[in-house]
Image (cartoon, grey):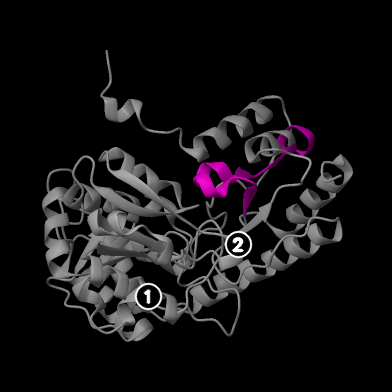
């Protein structure tokens, strides 16, 4: 049967390509060290798992029935309280918070609500592949905003053509950034807000890594901390990385109430929000002290230092990111493209990385390494790379 043109236009998801290489090696019995996907390797702490068990076993609440579309008011209140404590941002839990079955599905619902076929979306390049995929799925016209190393991987809004800006419907930005590890500045956020107001663009902030600062002096901010930002923006947050629970599929979108309401209209046609037991567990978790999140960030900092120092010691001059959970580094000059290097590295060492080209046009020439293996395996990966001679 013939699929839709929408499906035919969808690119191969970079992580699917990475998995294909990985599983081919594993089939041959090769010991693989996998830095390819940002899939936390550690479990959530016991108290979080116990909260989920309690919610599943709870006989007082009907947690195995459908949820209301907006999610539990208790969860939305917990999100509002967390945002107030963490960022000083006040949110109305009735109208300005929408729980999501992971931020990925929420992003697609938002695009379905605000982008018609051919509408312009300003998307950073490189970026989290789902940012591109969601725009492709609604057949939007994607205009790249290059994230260049010399600009600290921040887009230069001044280079966006006036005609493009005037017809753009959405501008998306993500800091701390995946894949580059770059961080925001208040000055940059103020420029984004001014640009959005001037051009009547919906501003979409993704702060999935806001709790994974790897530098004690750096505290990531919410875009909604800016005065009047809620009038022009929504913001996505995901629990996947902060709490080591990507499989739970929990996120939320907050901000402009009209945008929340229109996105909810789309969601009512495709889901009943998050499994109720998970909603109750997350409510409890958000209301608890966040010491585990700080410990998790410290763990990623140690891993970052082990891998950066190790790779530098063998001649690979990788940068040291301040946040998120990735290294983003240039490929050796002897290779012409990132996919070729990633495949060659895998074949010669069993070390899996993600090719930068999978994150967009301006990711070419780089690879991303997710900090999702233990330190001893990182040291082994460094040794394998050194022994292979691939950096020569």
Quarter of the view holding residue 305: bottom right
Quadrant of res 254? bottom left
At 39% from the left edge and 46% from the top edge, which residue is drawn? 132
- Looking at the image, do the residues carrying marks 2 and 1 touch, with CB atoms under 8 Å apart? no
> Which of 252/139 is in front?
139
Quarter of the figure that contains the C terminus: top right
Relative to 358, residue 48 above or below: below
Label 2 belongs to which residue? 149
Classed neighbour count for the residue bearing mark 2: other residues with Cα under 10 Å, few (<14), some (14–19), many (≥20): few
- Give the camera-side residue of 230 and 152: 152
Dot 1: element: helix
Residue 146 at x, y percent in the picture: 49, 56
The magenta segment is 345-369
Residue 342 visible within the image: yes
Position of residue 3 measured from the top left corner of the image (x, y, whole percent): 28, 20
Q: Is residue 70 above or below residue 331?
A: below
Which percent across, then down, holds residue 42? 56, 58
Task: Inspect the magenta stretch and tell me whether residue 87 lies in it.
Answer: no
Q: Is residue 249 visible?
A: no
Q: Mark 2 falls on what kind of element?
A: helix
Q: CA distance from mark 2 to mark 1?
A: 19 Å
User: Which residue is rendered at x = 30% and y = 54% of the image?
Assistant: 164
Dot 1, how many residues are within 10 Å of its Cα: few (below 14), some (14-19), or many (20+)?
Answer: some
314 left or right of 79 in image: right
Q: Which mark is residue 191?
A: 1
237 left or right, relative to 347: left
What residue occupies the far front of the structure in this picture?
162
């Amino acid at each position: 049967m013939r699929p839709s043109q929408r499906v035919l236009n969808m690119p191969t998801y970079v992580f699917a390509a990475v998995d294909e290489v990985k599983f081919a090696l594993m089939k041959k019995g090769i010991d693989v060290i996998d830095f390819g996907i940002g899939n936390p390797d550690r479990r959530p702490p016991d108290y979080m798992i116990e909260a989920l068990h309690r919610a599943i076993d709870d006989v007082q609440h009907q947690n195995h029935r459908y949820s209301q579309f907006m999610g539990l008011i208790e969860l939305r209140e917990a999100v509002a309280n967390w945002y107030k404590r963490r960022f000083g941002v006040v949110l109305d839990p009735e109208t300005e918070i929408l729980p999501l079955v992971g931020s990925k599905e929420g992003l697609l619902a938002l695009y379905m609500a605000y982008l018609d076929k051919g509408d312009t979306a300003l998307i950073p390049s490189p970026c989290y592949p789902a940012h591109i995929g969601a725009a492709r799925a609604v057949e939007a016209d994607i205009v790249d905003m290059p994230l260049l190393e010399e600009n600290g991987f921040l887009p230069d809004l001044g280079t966006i053509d006036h005609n493009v800006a005037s017809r753009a419907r959405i501008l998306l930005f993500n800091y701390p950034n995946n894949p580059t590890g770059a961080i925001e500045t208040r000055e940059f956020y103020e420029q984004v807000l001014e640009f959005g107001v001037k051009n009547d663009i919906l501003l979409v902030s993704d702060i999935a890594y806001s709790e994974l600062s790897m530098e004690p002096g750096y505290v990531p901010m919410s875009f909604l901390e800016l005065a009047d930002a809620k009038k022009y923006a929504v913001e996505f947050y995901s629990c996947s990385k902060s709490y080591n629970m990507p499989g739970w599929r929990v996120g939320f979108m907050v901000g402009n109430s009209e945008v929340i309401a229109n996105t909810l209209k789309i969601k009512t046609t495709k889901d009943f929000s998050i499994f109720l037991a998970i909603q109750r567990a997350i409510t409890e978790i958000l209301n608890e002290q966040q010491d585990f999140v700080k410990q998790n960030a410290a763990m990623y900092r140690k891993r970052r230092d082990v891998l950066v120092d190790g790779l530098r010691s063998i001649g690979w001059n990788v940068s040291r990111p301040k946040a998120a959970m990735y290294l983003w580094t240039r490929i050796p000059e002897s290779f012409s493209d990132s996919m070729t290097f990633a495949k060659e590295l895998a074949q010669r060492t069993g070390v899996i990385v993600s090719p930068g080209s999978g994150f967009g046009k301006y990711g070419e020439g780089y690879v991303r390494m997710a900090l999702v293996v233990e330190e001893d395996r990182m040291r082994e990966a460094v040794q394998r790379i050194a022994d292979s001679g691939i950096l020569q």
